[in-house]
Image (cartoon, rainbow, N blue to C red):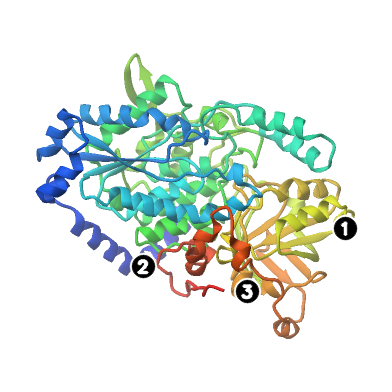
């Protein structure tokens, strides 16, 4: 085992000793012998099967067959979730064949960050993760269930389902993917058209044509953003069937894998609270780094770990990033998409080469048994029979996927920045080395639309600058993604300007070539240093040196009054935002997972509580 992997794991185990032990005590106390519904009084149980078909009702009246909950994020607007329409019935039949019974326990909301980018609705996006977790808990709350099937794909949805499932950690739980759409317009061409539109060189019709050719059918978007990072991480966590994450919808293999997931759930594998332990969390971090995954997971993984009693910190991610090599090039970190990655050997090869390099823990529980080596296998249909065979021992396309001893980069491309402005995350895997250091005057905005207006008026042309977009943190306005800024910043960078962005908000999992110091904490709305920065202050973003610098006398800066503010009162009305005042008032900081749930806090961390304005 690599010494850094061992050291990081050991300190996480030590840091989490008390909280993990308490979590395990709680889930062990919730486990019962025999079907859980056996504990219900007759009136409770009668309510639980009143609407069932006669054969299902008979099975639920009995005390032999396990009952599996199905929780789904289906809706027919999200391309990634549309395939889930027919899953419940297929899964119910599969569970019955596996010796159990299944009920559709509940649905959870699913919003699309791609639709809400730059819109007020995006201010609900991060909060939706915790809403989904709560909705999952409600679905499982009836004590009718002995296991669960979770159906979810995209950005906040899979983390929310997982956090909710971990609150019922005594239940064996299988996550069921739906797969990516087939490859459409290359992502690099889509990005090129976006920049042309930002410059006014093409119109809306041309832009819409390019977008529609890229996002063209049912299935996950094919770039390697948060949605596909979710799927890879669920597999490496041992919660998907091996090799199931990136099989396209509507194919015989996809349908066979869905049926197999139902049968596996009926067999009641290891409870999810035992699967997601300290070693599994470290494996997920390594997989995120090696694949060049979404920066959103610097928050989601912390929140997921906390839900299992594990205290993960940004320092853990940073130390792992220094030794985990970058093994894949998927857009925005390259030209390929997830279909190309899967064809080149995909997760099976990545797990194999990382295990061989001592960079993953094999000693973990999964839904298919003990040992992560099981995820070096891939599913194959032999006639009507689904089997698992050894995956490739070599990459089939070195332009997309490489072994650990010949990586694209010796580190994972995810760095932590520290300095007078606080702590931040920066993803460097898509940023060229010559763009990783920017020291320039700040241009300060309290709203992303003001930045785009300044760009449109040519006010940012011909000069180097660091765009400071503040009051975008969890407590300010729900920490929206600021992906709409990427094309404009990319235009200026391509013209030869030195540009960077510093923000307490998020960038999309698809953000790429412009250096972006994001998730700055403490955030401006809580009086963080960003609230005192002014136009013209020289700011340094040094990705390689790990510095988020401010070249202003410390005492002078400390005496400055706070300027700007987050939206308040009636400014929050509309698009449902007024319903989330309690979230804004209680949400934790980015480095503690940006969650409204109390949970594990690592030594030295404090979860701020914001009082409503």
Secondary-structure class at tag 3: loop
Q: Which mark is residue 463?
A: 1
Q: Picture coordinates of residue 394 (x, y %)?
A: 50, 30
- Label 2 CA crowd tier, 10 Å (few <14, some 14–19, many 20+): few
- Using the numbered discs, state the Cα–Cα distance from disc 1 to disc 3 in whole angstroms: 27 Å
- Label 3 CA crowd tier, 10 Å (few <14, some 14–19, many 20+): many
Q: Going from the N terminus, do you reach mark 3 or mark 2 first? A: 2
Q: Mark 1, mark 2: which one is toward the viewer?
A: 1
Secondary-structure class at tag 2: helix
Residue 369, by quadrant, is top left
Res 315 seen here: no
- Using the numbered discs, state the Cα–Cα distance from disc 3 to disc 2 in whole angstroms: 31 Å
Q: Mark 3, mark 2: which one is toward the viewer?
A: 3
Give the residue at mark 3.
Answer: 528
Q: Which mark is residue 14?
A: 2
Please name the residue shown 30% across and 30% down the image: 91
Residue lying furthest right in this view? 462
Q: Going from the N terminus, do you reach mark 1 or mark 2 first? A: 2
Q: Is residue 41 left or right of residue 147?
A: left
- Residue 62, placed above or below residue 412: above
Total numbered badges shown on the rendered structure: 3
């Amino acid at each position: 085992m690599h010494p850094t992997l061992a050291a990081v794991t050991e300190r996480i185990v030590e840091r989490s000793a008390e909280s993990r032990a308490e979590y395990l005590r709680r889930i062990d106390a919730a486990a019962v012998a025999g079907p859980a519904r056996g504990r219900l009084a007759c009136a409770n149980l009668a309510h639980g099967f009143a609407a069932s078909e006669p054969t299902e009702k008979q099975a639920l009246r009995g005390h032999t067959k396990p009952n599996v909950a199905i929780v789904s994020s289906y809706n027919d607007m999200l391309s990634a979730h549309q395939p889930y329409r027919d899953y419940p019935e297929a899964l119910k039949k599969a569970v019955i064949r596996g010796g159990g019974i299944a009920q559709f326990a509940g649905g959870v909301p699913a919003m699309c960050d791609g639709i809400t980018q730059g819109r007020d609705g995006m201010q609900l996006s991060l909060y939706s993760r915790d809403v989904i977790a709560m909705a999952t808990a409600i679905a499982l709350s009836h004590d009718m269930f002995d296991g669960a099937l979770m159906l979810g794909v995209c950005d906040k949805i899979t983390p929310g389902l997982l956090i909710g499932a971990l609150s019922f950690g005594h239940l064996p739980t299988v996550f069921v993917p739906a797969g990516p759409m087939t490859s459409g317009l290359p992502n690099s061409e889509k990005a090129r058209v976006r920049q042309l539109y930002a410059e006014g060189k093409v119109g809306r019709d041309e832009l819409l044509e390019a977008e529609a050719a890229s996002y063209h059918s049912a299935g996950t978007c094919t770039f390697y953003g948060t949605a596909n990072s979710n799927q890879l991480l669920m597999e490496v966590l041992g919660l998907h069937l091996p090799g199931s994450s990136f099989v396209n919808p509507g194919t015989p293999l996809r349908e066979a894998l869905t049926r197999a997931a139902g049968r596996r759930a009926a067999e009641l594998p290891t409870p999810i609270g035992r699967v997601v332990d300290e070693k599994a969390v470290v494996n997920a971090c390594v997989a995120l780094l090696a694949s060049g995954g979404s920066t959103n997971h610097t928050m989601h993984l912390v929140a997921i770990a906390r839900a299992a009693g594990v205290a993960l910190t940004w320092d853990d991610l940073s130390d792992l990033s220094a030794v985990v090599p970058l093994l894949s090039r998927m857009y925005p970190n390259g030209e390929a998409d997830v279909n190309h990655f899967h064809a080149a050997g995909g997760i099976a090869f990545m797990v194999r080469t990382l295990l061989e390099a001592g960079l993953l823990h094999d000693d973990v529980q999964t839904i298919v048994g003990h040992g992560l080596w099981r995820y070096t296998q891939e599913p194959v249909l032999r006639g009507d029979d689904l089997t698992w065979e050894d995956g490739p021992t070599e990459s089939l396309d070195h332009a997309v996927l490489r072994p650990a001893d010949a990586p694209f980069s010796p580190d994972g491309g995810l760095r932590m920045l520290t300095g007078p402005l606080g702590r931040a995350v920066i993803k460097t895997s898509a940023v060229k080395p010559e763009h990783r250091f920017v020291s320039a005057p700040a241009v300060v905005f309290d709203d992303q639309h003001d930045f785009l207006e300044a760009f449109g008026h040519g006010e940012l042309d011909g000069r180097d600058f660091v765009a400071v977009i503040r009051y975008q943190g969890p407590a300010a306005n729900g920490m929206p993604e600021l992906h709409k800024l990427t094309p404009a910043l990319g235009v200026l960078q391509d013209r030869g300007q030195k540009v960077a962005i510093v923000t307490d908000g998020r960038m999309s999992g698809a953000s790429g070539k412009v250096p972006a110091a994001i998730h700055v904490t403490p955030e401006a709305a809580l009086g963080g240093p960003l609230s005192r920065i002014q136009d013209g202050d020289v700011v340094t973003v040094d990705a390689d040196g790990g510095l988020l610098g401010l070249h202003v006398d410390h005492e002078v800066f400390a005496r400055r009054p706070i300027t700007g503010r987050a939206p308040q009162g009636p400014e929050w009305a509309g698009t449902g935002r007024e319903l989330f005042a309690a979230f804004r008032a209680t949400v934790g900081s980015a480095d503690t997972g940006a969650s409204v749930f109390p949970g594990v806090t690592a030594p030295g961390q404090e979860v701020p509580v914001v009082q409503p304005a």
